[in-house]
Image (spheres, rainbow, N blue to C red):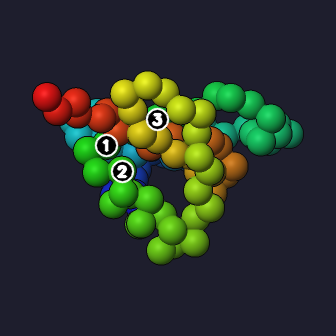
Amino acid sequence: MIIGLPEKEKPESLKGRGGFWLEVGDRDVHIGTEDGFDRLTTKAHLAYQVEDLSYWRSVLEQNNIKIFEGVPIPGFQRFEFRDPFGNRVEMIQELVERN
């Protein structure tokens, strides 16, 4: 639970299908897994919009998670990493413009 999202127990009938469920605020996020698929060749990913990108970069680096710089998007800072299953995950923070 490096990124602080608690895992939610799946119903017994779904436990043998792989993947896992997370609690994100008042929502559940269901993460599926598939065998025989090269996750390193896909652009598909999950993104978390955060308020302190440098904090999350530090947490991940302290846990020996390799960080990849994402393609720049105007008005945002972002980076990517791979979860334990090889899925691409993005952390993104909107930049606040100051006048």
Give the structural element (helix, strand or loop) at label 3.
strand
Q: Nearer the viewer, residue 12 or 10?
A: 10
Q: Which residue is mark 1?
A: 50
The quarter of the picture where the C terminus appears is top left
The quarter of the picture where the N terminus appears is bottom left
Q: Amino acid at mark 2?
A: Leu
The local crowd at label 2, few if under 14, some if 14 to 19, many if 20 or more residues have their Cα within 10 Å, is some
Kindly give the residue lying farthest to the top in the view shown: 74
Q: Amino acid at mark 1?
A: Val
Q: Where in the figure is residue 89, as x and y percent of width and height?
A: 55, 42
Q: CB atoms at circles 2 and 1 under 8 Å apart?
A: yes
Mark 2 → mark 3, Cα distance in angstroms: 12 Å
The local crowd at label 1, few if under 14, some if 14 to 19, many if 20 or more residues have their Cα within 10 Å, is some
Q: Which residue is mark 3?
A: 47
Q: State the residue at coordinates (64%, 28%).
A: 44
Q: Which residue is mark 2?
A: 53
Residue 42 falls in image quadrant = top right
